[in-house]
Image: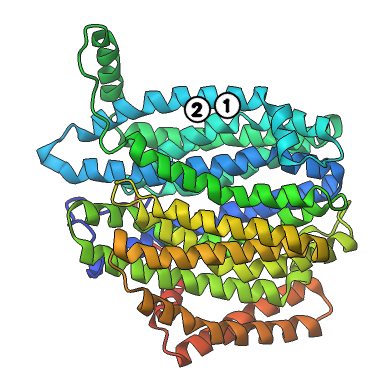
Amino acid sequence: MSGTAEVREPAGAPRPVPGRDRGQRFVARAAGLTAVLAAGGALFGLLRDQMIARLFGADSATDAFLVSWTIPEFASTLLIEEAMALVLVPAFSVALARGTADPDAVRRLLAGSLPRVLLGLAAAAALAALAAPLLVRLLAPGLADPALAVDCTRLTAVTVLTFGIAGYFSAALRAHRRYLAPAAIYIGYNIGIIATALALHSRFGVRAAALGVAVGGVLMVLLQLPFFLRTLPVRAAWADWRAARRTAADGTRRPYVLGVTFALVAPIVLFALSRQAQVLVERFLASSLTPGAISHLNYAQKVGQIPMVLALMIPTVTLPLVARALAEGDSEAARRRVERDLLLVGIVAALGAAYVIACAPQLIEVLFQRGEFTAESTAATAAVMRVYALGLLGHTLVGALIRPFFSAARPVWFPLAAMGVGLAITVVAGSVAVRYWGAPGIAAANAAGITATALLLMRGLAGRVVPIDPAAVMAGLGRLLPAALAATAAGWATAARIPSAPLSTLLTALVTAAVFAACARALRVPEAVTLLSAVRRKPKATS
């Protein structure tokens, strides 16, 4: 893999600082390459979902599999996307910022954290497999086939270990500004699921998909391992760890793990768990509806959140820059970077929501309507996805806001409180709405809860970590609303007039994007112009 292209900061270049041209070009290239690979992962994710829909449809068997998929979903959020990254990226960034003052900081951090992480992950994976029957009863008490869900859950439990290792590797590599391998892991993950399910579905049924999840997790680790070994001082850290083990019996002090303490980890982990708990609420409420409701919610969410996944590549790339700026006391640079990121991700989310709402039925038909996935399933999934799209901006802003909250590598409990408010709204509103509107009511409650959390995080960030101007950010986001409404109306009209679903999705995308861009330019949203210019430029990659 040594010849694989990767975005790297030029040797000897100054540290990228928001506002400097050199730093902006580096961020643009890194974000561009990361977005391309993330789009590839999302594409394979769609192929995975298409395959599952075609092979197994949307019935009690897929509901059982999706309940077991709760573990990988939690593991992905906790161990790859949020908690692990929000703990380790700032920690490694602080270690790197110490530079010549403490050249062994990275090695000591690695030696003090990685062995403990591996041991904890292995124990958690074993516990999840043993507790599978209890987990299924708690997650979906009304499930039609709980025994199948238990079998699948025991297979997917291995992702607690593999996702955790992959998340550790990703965080360490991103802190060192190596983005290629971390961005490519979901491609390998989805290829593992697709290949395993296609090869074994006739023999094992939906259990083959669960086995594929386990295989995909292993591929995540293997994709990053060569890069991790080449970039991090693994051998020296291993020697330090063995030396510490030998001297521990003599009372010698163990190496200090920079910035990684229980006080720091606890609020991050609890926030990630509370955010992912929205999925638990949805599946708990949907388990009492007709078979297939959990599947409709899942497919709608997976497709509807693709714009969010792409948008969050921007703050994912800039997280090490913000963390390092805060570590060096440059709060002004951090403020500029965060405010710009929030507006950029808002543009992507608003445009994505407009497109999803405009042609949801056609999009679901193109992606899933084949084999066991019927026209009725298409209509039900599209109805849910249109409601989900109302919360897309909220989901995206929460994902972008939480990164600077924990960039300072110090305990911050406010995000957990904000997510608690949003989760409470989701629970109360969902419990009421499901009685009248079924699955779309659950989606509406999700949108309301996450939007409330985003607003609270926006207000709380300014006074606690990064001194952003919430009013200015909200004003910039507010200018996107007319553009999104106009794009939605134009896209809906286009989709309704074209009988061919594939052609409709293509032309609607073009019309929606064109109208949105024209309106954003007319409303003088400078970030929209910058983003469109960046999209037109070909991202550079150097070895």
Numbered marks: total = 2
SS for callout 2: helix
Most foreground residue, 68 or 309: 68
Q: Which quadrant does the N terminus fall into?
A: top left
Q: Is residue 32 visible?
A: no
Residue 67 in the image, given as x and y percentages of width and height = 73, 41
Judged left or right of residue 251, residue 346 is right
The residue pinned by badge 1 equals 125
Residue at 28% of width from left, 30% of height from top?
A: 233
Mark 1 Cα-neighbour bin, 10 Å: few <14, some 14–19, many ≥20: many
Q: Amino acid at mark 2?
A: Leu
SS for callout 1: helix
Residue at 27% of width from left, 46% of height from top?
A: 93
Residue 405 in the image, given as x and y percentages of width and height = 36, 55
When asked about the image quadrant of residue 124, the answer is top right
Judged left or right of residue 250, residue 523 is right
CA distance separating discs 2 and 1: 6 Å
Q: Amino acid at mark 1?
A: Ala
Disc number placed over residue 121 in the picture, else none: 2
When asked about the image quadrant of residue 199, the answer is top right
Most foreground residue, 307 or 474: 474
Circles 2 and 1: CB distance less than 8 Å? yes
Residue at 55% of width from left, 87% of height from top?
A: 482
Most foreground residue, 34 or 447: 447
Residue at 57% of width from left, 26% of height from top?
A: 125
Residue 135 in the image, given as x and y percentages of width and height = 69, 33
Q: In the image, is residue 289 above or below residue 506? A: above
Judged left or right of residue 146, residue 125 is left
Judged left or right of residue 392, residue 183 is left
Q: Is residue 28 visible?
A: yes
